Image (cartoon, grey):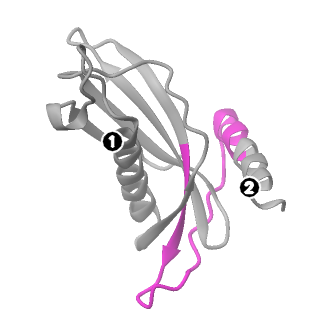
């Protein structure tokens, strides 16, 4: 399996709404997901990438001001010029325990020096977990494209 790409953020005031107990803006989390997903995709393809879509994003738990947010991204599927990256986001507590905030699947297209799509290295699932993720990625692709 490709190596995980990890990003760690501390939720700062500019990342929050104005409630009495400030929560992380969903849009800020989406930006962090897009960035860490793109880094994973760039590392995998050794090229520039562009975001095609981020699938359904459901917030399971909140992140609050001063929380530590950990995002872990890894490639789950590749097509000819595109690839899907899973990004798991967690709030990490001071004792090291984690609660998942969300899981997102982002699709990127690799780009050549002329900003045209270019072929990506094939991802061949080996473990049972990889095979399940790969099959699920094919189903998500079918739902997105009808193919």
For residue 107: magenta?
yes
- Residue at position x 31%, y 29% in the image: 24
For marks 1 and 2 on the same chain, the one whose residue lies earlier in the sequence: 1
Q: Secondary structure at mark 2?
A: helix
Q: Which residues are magenta?
A: 105-134
Q: Write down the residue under mark 2.
A: 144
Give above or below for 1 relative to 115: above
**With respect to residue 42, does 90 lie above or below?**
above
Instruction: Choose between 103 and 11: the one closer to the eye.
Output: 11
Percent position (x, y) of residue 38? 41, 58
The residue under the point 66% across, 55% down is: 124
The numbered disc on residue 28 is 1
Q: Residue at x 50, y 20 (%)?
A: 60
Q: Is residue 5 left or right of residue 145?
A: left
Up/down of 110 relative to 106, above or below: below
The residue depicted at 27 percent of the width and 29 percent of the height is 17
């Amino acid at each position: 399996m490709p190596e995980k790409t990890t990003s760690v953020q501390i939720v700062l005031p500019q990342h929050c709404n104005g409630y009495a107990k400030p929560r992380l803006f969903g849009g800020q989390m989406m930006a962090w997901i897009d960035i860490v997903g793109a880094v994973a995709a760039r590392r995998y393809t050794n090229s520039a990438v562009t975001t095609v879509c981020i699938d359904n994003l459901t917030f399971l738990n909140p992140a609050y001001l001063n929380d530590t947010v950990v995002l872990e991204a890894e490639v789950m599927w590749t097509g000819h010029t595109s690839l899907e990256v899973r990004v798991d986001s967690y709030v990490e507590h001071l004792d090291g325990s984690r609660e998942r905030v969300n899981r997102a699947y982002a699709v990127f297209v690799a780009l050549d020096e002329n900003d045209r799509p270019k072929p990506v290295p094939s991802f061949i699932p080996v473990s049972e977990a990889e095979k399940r993720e790969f099959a699920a990625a094919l189903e998500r692709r079918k739902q997105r494209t009808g193919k």
